[in-house]
Image: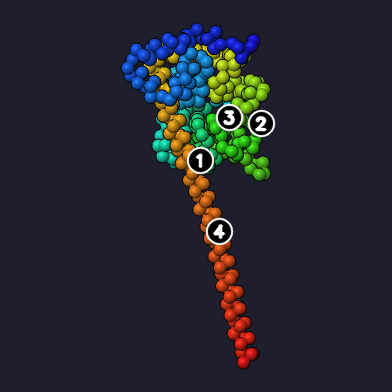
Amino acid sequence: MNYRETKLSQFFPSIRGKELILDDIRKSSKLSSIYENWSNDQQEEFLDICIGNKGVKMLYDSFFKEVLNPEYTPDRLSDLLSVLIEKKVKVKDVLPNDSTRLGDEMSLVITDIVVELEDKSLANIEVQKLGYLFTGERASCYSADLLLRQYKRLRDKAKSKFSYKDIAPVYTIVFLESSPACFGEFKNEYVHRFSTTSNTGLNLNMLQNFIFIPIDIFLEKLHNRGIESELDAWLTFLGCDEPKYIIELITKYPSFKSMYSDLYDLCQNIERVMEMWSKELQILDRNTVKYMIDELQEQLDDANATIADKDATIADKDATIADKDATIAELQKKLSKYES
């Protein structure tokens, strides 16, 4: 099959044409106002999604939660987590995300979902549009928060019968749409798994696990080698909006077709989809501003540190010169005694 020339509408009959979509928008003053407030590029991207010229990056919060909603379709998220964790798991429950975020309300996080698995493990699935400058440090703090949350819940429930052996592993899973520079040093790796190990081989049940997925690096691999595994299939579904790869995906892995069908059925409700799209645009704008502030702050800190280093160097040189001046003055004083 020629994936490049095939249209998404051949697979999803609910996809409508551009004029029908625009007609729905023009009929409503509310929708017309929303549409006119978007930039030309934003309007075109929205229409391209609705008419199947391009797919949706499912990492967008609204679309992720719509298609992979763990309350209504837990099997989908269970399958994704099973591939990432590399063992069969099942989502049992969705937990309210009441963890204390270290950042302010202008977080770079797009999606943040906490679920309890059937084996009592907790998994935090997070999507970042722009990777944080301190990815490892930040993830460690939130993993500790997730572990402490489980500890408190079990302790309060068990009371005096509480035992640490009842605490299950926690998984912090972070999708990075645009990953920090350090990930670029591993151009052939797009899943990084971290867990605690000893230098001696001693095996203790350490509970914190981390999985980082740089989607931008995966897409480079996808463009070069295509979809080669179930993991590739999931990451294509989540991070790629190019029709030829979507068609390759649903051809090789037909189970993904129903997820795209849900999306295009949703596009029949143009008001709902426009509200979702507006939310995503607000998140992206907010994230970009926050990221720029963080970058500028880091540059300012570096500049201040450089100035401080130079000031210290100048102060050292001034002290050296002063010592030499004092020595010269002392020698001249002695010399004058000899001359007299």
Residue 280's image quarter?
A: top left
Question: Who is closer to the viewer here, 168 or 293?
Answer: 293
Q: Residue furthest bottom?
A: 340
Say what secondary structure mark 1 lies in: helix
In space, the residues marked 2 and 1 are separated at their CA atoms by 24 Å
Q: Earlier in the sequence, mark 3 or mark 2?
A: 2
Asked whether the viewer can see residue 167, the reply is yes
Say what secondary structure mark 4 lies in: helix
The residue singled out by tag 1 in the image is 138
Q: Earlier in the sequence, mark 3 or mark 4?
A: 3
The amino acid pointed to by label 3 is: Asp
The answer to whether the residues at label 3 and label 2 have Cβ atoms under 8 Å apart is no
- Percent position of residue 311, x then y: 53, 60
Question: Who is closer to the viewer here, 331 or 197?
Answer: 331
Question: In the rendering, which numbered label is found on residue 188?
Answer: 2
Q: Nearer the viewer, mark 2 or mark 1?
A: 2
The residue singled out by tag 4 in the image is 310
Q: Nearer the viewer, mark 3 or mark 4?
A: 4
The amino acid pointed to by label 4 is: Lys
